[in-house]
Image (spheres, grey):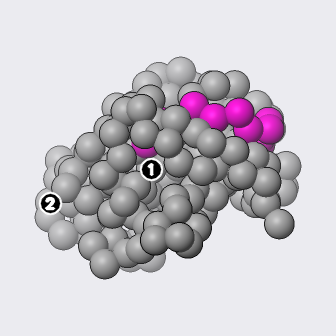
């Protein structure tokens, strides 16, 4: 059973009408870039919880989570309604094996993501540990609309930081967008 701690919302970023990032301060245990936590709220006497990947580096004391609001969802609309100073529950220990130590060395590390699944890759890239064993890194972020490329400025900063080692490729499926491929990842 998970140990829960109380977190406090310190920032809410509204990217679109359905995409938000919550920045939370909570006394959690150290996590590995690529892992996730569970967030929860007590709703009508029931603890409603869902898993969300960390976007931030483990070295950043502010925890950032990127989520999509599901209109009829039990939790996401409530999370989207939180404001600075509100509290929520966060698992004290992170979970998951979507971490670099599980990835064998290779010439090119491919990071393929759609929508809010960009989070663990941004956590890994912001930390930057253990990436020297890859000659090239390709980060692909596929979304429906260009406005959904919420973290593109951060991705571009990371590309600069990695000085040619990291290539960013965006894909937009429902409209044409300069600099992005059109369609879906498999195509």
Label 2–label 1 contact, CB within 8 A: no
At x 84% / y 56%, what residue is drawn? 102
Q: Is residue 33 left or right of residue 93?
A: left
Q: Is residue 31 magenta?
A: yes
Q: Number of marks in the image?
A: 2
The residue most toward the front is 45
- Magenta range is 22-32
Q: Which residue is mark 2?
A: 176
Q: Position of residue 113 (x, y in %)?
A: 49, 60
Distance (Cα) linking label 2 and label 1: 24 Å
At x 33% / y 71%, what residue is drawn? 70
Q: Which mark is residue 66?
A: 1
Q: Position of residue 122 (x, y in %)?
A: 55, 41
Q: Residues within 10 Å of mark 1 (few under 14, many from 20)?
A: many
- Residue 142 in sight from this viewpoint: no
> In the rendered image, which quarter is residue 59 located in?
top right
Q: Is residue 43 left or right of residue 26?
A: left
Q: Which SS type dominates the magenta stretch? A: loop
Q: Position of residue 93 (x, y in %)?
A: 79, 49
SS of the residue at dot 1? strand
At x 33% / y 53%, what residue is drawn? 80
Q: Which mark is residue 152?
A: none
> In the rendered image, which quarter is residue 63 located in?
top right
Q: Earlier in the sequence, mark 2 or mark 1?
A: 1
**Residue 162 against residue 44 in the figure, above or below:** above
Q: For the N terminus, give its image quadrant.
A: bottom right
- Residue 133 in sight from this viewpoint: yes
At x 14% / y 60%, what residue is drawn? 176
Q: For the C terminus, give its image quadrant.
A: bottom left
Q: Residues within 10 Å of mark 2 (few under 14, many from 20)?
A: some
């Amino acid at each position: 059973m998970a140990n829960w701690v109380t977190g406090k919302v310190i920032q809410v970023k509204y990217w679109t009408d359905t995409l938000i990032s919550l920045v939370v301060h909570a006394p959690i245990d150290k996590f590995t870039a690529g892992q996730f936590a569970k967030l929860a709220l007590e709703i009508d006497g029931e603890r409603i919880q869902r898993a969300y990947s960390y976007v931030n580096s483990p070295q950043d004391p502010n925890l950032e989570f990127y989520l999509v609001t599901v209109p009829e969802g039990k939790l996401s609309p409530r999370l989207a309604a939180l404001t600075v100073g509100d509290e929520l529950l966060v698992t004290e220990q992170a979970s998951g094996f979507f971490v670099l130590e599980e990835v064998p060395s290779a010439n090119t590390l491919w990071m393929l993501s759609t929508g809010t699944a960009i989070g663990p890759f941004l956590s890994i890239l912001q930390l930057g540990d253990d990436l020297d064993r890859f000659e090239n890194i390709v980060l692909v972020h596929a979304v429906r609309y260009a406005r959904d490329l919420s973290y593109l400025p951060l991705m571009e900063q990371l590309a600069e930081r990695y000085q040619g080692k990291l290539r960013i490729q965006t894909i937009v499926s429902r409209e044409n967008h300069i600099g992005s491929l059109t369609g879906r990842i498999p195509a």
